[in-house]
Image: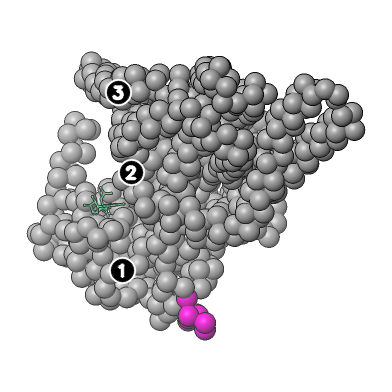
Amino acid sequence: MSPPDAAGHHENPGAAPQAKVALGDLLAPVRSRLLLACLLEAIGALAKVVPLIALVELARELLRDPVREERVWAVVAVAAGALLLRLLTSGAALTLTHLADSAFQFDVRRRAARRLGHVPLGWFTDRSSGRVKKALTDDVADLHHLVGHAYLELTTAIVAPSAALVYLLVSDWRLTLLTLLPVLVGVIQYSLMMRGQEEQMERYQRSIAGVSAAAVEFVDGIAVVKTFGQAGHAHTRFTRAAESFVTDFWEWVRGMLRGSTVAELALAPFTTLLAALVAGAAFVQAGWVPPADVLPFLVVGVAVAGPFLELNYAYQHLVSARHAAGNIQRLLSTETLPPAPDAPAIPVDARVRFAGVRFGYSGGAEVIRGVDLDLRPGTVTALVGPSGAGKSTLAALLARFWDPTEGHITIGGADLREMAQLTLYQQVGMVLQDIRLVHDSVRENIRMAREGASEEEVIAAARAANIHERIMALPRGYDSVHGEDANLSGGEAQRVAIARALLADTPVVILDEATAYADPDSETAIQNALSRLAVGRTLLVIAHRLRAVTDVDQICVVNDGRIVERGDHHSLLAREGLYAELWGAQEALAEGRTS
Ligand SMILES: Nc1ncnc2c1ncn2[C@@H]1O[C@H](COP(=O)(O)OP(=O)(O)OP(=O)(O)O)[C@@H](O)[C@H]1O
């Protein structure tokens, strides 16, 4: 058995039985086509053995005196017919499996798209994008080999030797046993080697995943690592992972080296031929069989031994495809949000209410621990508080990135869980710090907020967001493409996002106040754009700098998953609580900077 290539397939090793089920489930829609293809391939495999038998019969016939000419031609015709049949059935089987493969790929991708359309938005992190990419490209490609080729190879590797074996047994069972003795040794040796291979392969995959992770960490973090003089440390981690991989790999290969050499020698066609020759010669010498009866073993014997190696490769493909199927099945069973009721709720206005909201990330500790909040239409509410207090989580719950584990969030009296997805997105807009622009023109980046928006509306939104002039200065104006000729700074990208939010014109807007863009011009432009965005909407701002929100309608101080203080700037300062403390600390820092 040869070790697999360095593809690294598994995310959740040790799940062989589930993986088997996953493969069966995934292939269910194409099972009948695969069965038909295997049946055709089996006919082809039988037809593959016929010319070898015909060769033996031909030789027997030619050794006769007199030669029966019409029988010779009949044998030749049968051989040619079998070859043609093999060609036709194999071609048809291969076409069927490839049709089945494209149907299967289409089915998996369609199911994934449907499923992912209903998973909570919060699920879409960089890590889950990686999982989606891996499952829908790498793992689906792994299954291509199985569906398109390995099942057929497996069929031929079983049917052809079995047919040859039956023919040999019928010819002379004693010579068959002697000729195939080395094959028996090879098969036993292989079976011994196969024991524990799945676990061994998983160890190998884990090891290689460790090297990949260390390499990614090393390359991704190279700037930070170098800046902080930790290059040696990160490098050591990579080297250690690589060394441990080499050790694991070598132990696996070394353990198999002797066994696989013996097995491959025993199964080599030359060995079968030698055994047939030696046994045949002895039988002829002893007068037990005429020389012509040794011919089947010299010609057909090889067909029994050869396919065992193919059987092994096909088995390896099956194992790796099972793991790939497990990954795909896990993606297809990602938890989704419960669907909206048949008659979805419609908000009557833009009033937002959190009532007794509690939430913890995927079964972890609670990070929101009983929040009541009332955002009246046309007002601005700021969430402030120490890092990790739960501000972003509260905002994410309002956009239904996740559902609260307890309590309700309503917009205009309608529970988010009872609203249709589209209704929710027509109500809530977001401008986050981490702006995502897509690889498209600046115009389309703004227009994605409202597909049917006219050119004038796009430009009006860009003007209101203070980004129109900058866009006009780009090489192709609104046609400039993000990532090509539109390289926007963080502050500029934020203003494109504000233009998007203005165009979307949602009555509720969540805003993660940007702190990263220190350039005063950009900051003033952003602040002005935001003031325009705030007009007439229900605005929830996650504020990092208290100075930016001193004149909002309501400030909520979040600490440890609860709102511990609320009021306006002056009343909160007068309470001399956490807000006053945070304010004091930020002011001292600002003074320190200016002095
Ligand atoms: N995707 C996530 N999975 C698990 N835990 C998370 C996730 N996002 C945040 N948390 C945890 O939830 C808690 C609240 O985090 P959150 O980001 O809401 O705080 P925050 O007040 O917005 O902090 P900051 O001001 O630093 O952005 C933290 O303990 C954080 O580690």
Are circles 1 and 3 on residues that touch, CB within 8 Å?
A: no
| Residue 88 position (above or below residue 239) | below
Select label 3 or label 2 by which is in front: 3
Q: Where residue 322 appears, x then y in whole percent?
A: 45, 46
Is 215 in the magenta? no
Residue placed at 22% from the left, 57% from the top?
Answer: 364
Residue placed at 9% from the left, 59% from the top? 576
Q: Where 192 falls versus 447 (above or below)?
A: above
**Residue 579 figure quarter:** bottom left
Residue flagged by tag 3: what amino acid is it? Gly
> Looking at the image, which residue is at 74% across and 26% down?
60
N-terminal label among 1 and 3 = 3
Asked if the residue at tag 2 contacts the one at tag 3, i.e. Cβ–Cβ closer than 8 Å, the answer is no
Magenta stretch bounds = 340-348
Q: Is residue 257 visible?
A: yes
Question: Disc 3 marks which residue?
Answer: 255
Return the mark for residue 584: none
User: Would you call the spot at circle 2 few (<14 residues within 10 Å), some (14-19), or many (20 or more)?
Assistant: some
Few, some or many residues within 10 Å of mark 3 (<14, 14–19, 20+) = few
Closer to the camera: disc 2 or disc 1? Answer: 2
Q: Is mark 3 within 8 Å of ligand 1?
A: no
Image color mode = one colour
Q: CA distance from mark 2 to mark 1?
A: 32 Å
Mark 1, other Cα within 10 Å: few <14 / some 14–19 / many ≥20: many
- Say which mark, if any, is on residue 404: 1
> Tag on residue 13?
2
**For the residue marked with disc 2, what is the amino acid?**
Pro
Residue 588 vertical placement versus 428 (above, below): above
For the stretch drawn in magenta, what is the main secondary structure? loop
Cα–Cα gap, marks 1 and 3: 53 Å
Residue 232: % across, % down: 23, 15
